[in-house]
Amino acid sequence: MMMSEVHMQFGEGYMKKDYRADILVYDRNLHPLMVVECKRPDVHLAQEVVEQVLRYNMVMHAPYLAVTNGQSSYVCHLEDGKYVFQKKVPTYLEMIGNE
């Protein structure tokens, strides 16, 4: 229920931009469940990385977002219109159980 290098477009006309999510996890109905952005280990997971995955999610509308550099990983879940950092990476069953 995952796909890598998922192509998407955001915007319209001359403002249209192409993006590519590193990993997209789908629920059992093939709706986006989690967008994952992967960086090299030497890349600091700064605000720009979070903004990148948020941009992708403006197209995908997944309830979970994750960023990782292999050293550190952060997962957020959309709750009542706000992203809440999770204490651990949820299992697939935990994620689909929340939907």
Image: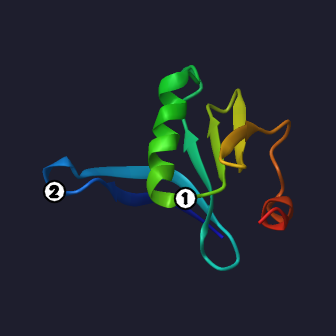
The local crowd at label 2, few if under 14, some if 14 to 19, many if 20 or more residues have their Cα within 10 Å, is few
Q: Residue at x 82, y 62 (%)?
A: 98
Report which residue position mark 1 lands on. Answer: 61
Report which residue position mark 2 lands on. Answer: 13
**Secondary structure under badge 1?**
loop
Location of residue 50 with respect to 57 vertically, above or below: above
Location of residue 86 with respect to 16 vertically, above or below: above
**Residue 42: % across, % down:** 56, 20
- The quarter of the displayed image where residue 8 is located: bottom left
Q: Residue at x 51, y 42 (%)?
A: 54
**Residue 64: % across, % down:** 67, 51
Farthest residue toward the bottom? 29
10 relative to 60 in the view: left or right: left
**Secondary structure under badge 2?**
helix
Location of residue 31 with respect to 75 vertically, above or below: below
The local crowd at label 1, few if under 14, some if 14 to 19, many if 20 or more residues have their Cα within 10 Å, is some
**Residue 24: % across, % down:** 57, 59
Q: Residue at x 55, y 42 (%)?
A: 37
73 relative to 51 in the view: left or right: right
Q: Residue at x 46, y 37 (%)?
A: 52
3D distance between C-alphas at marks 2 and 1: 21 Å
The front one of 5 and 34 is 34
52 relative to 19 in the view: left or right: right
Residue type at mark 2 is: Gly
Indicate which disc residue 93 carries.
none
**How are the residues colored?**
rainbow
The front one of 24 and 42 is 24
- The quarter of the displayed image where residue 45 is located: top right
The disc, 2 or 1, on the residue closer to the chain's N-terminal end is: 2
The front one of 24 and 39 is 24
Location of residue 55 with respect to 50 vertically, above or below: below
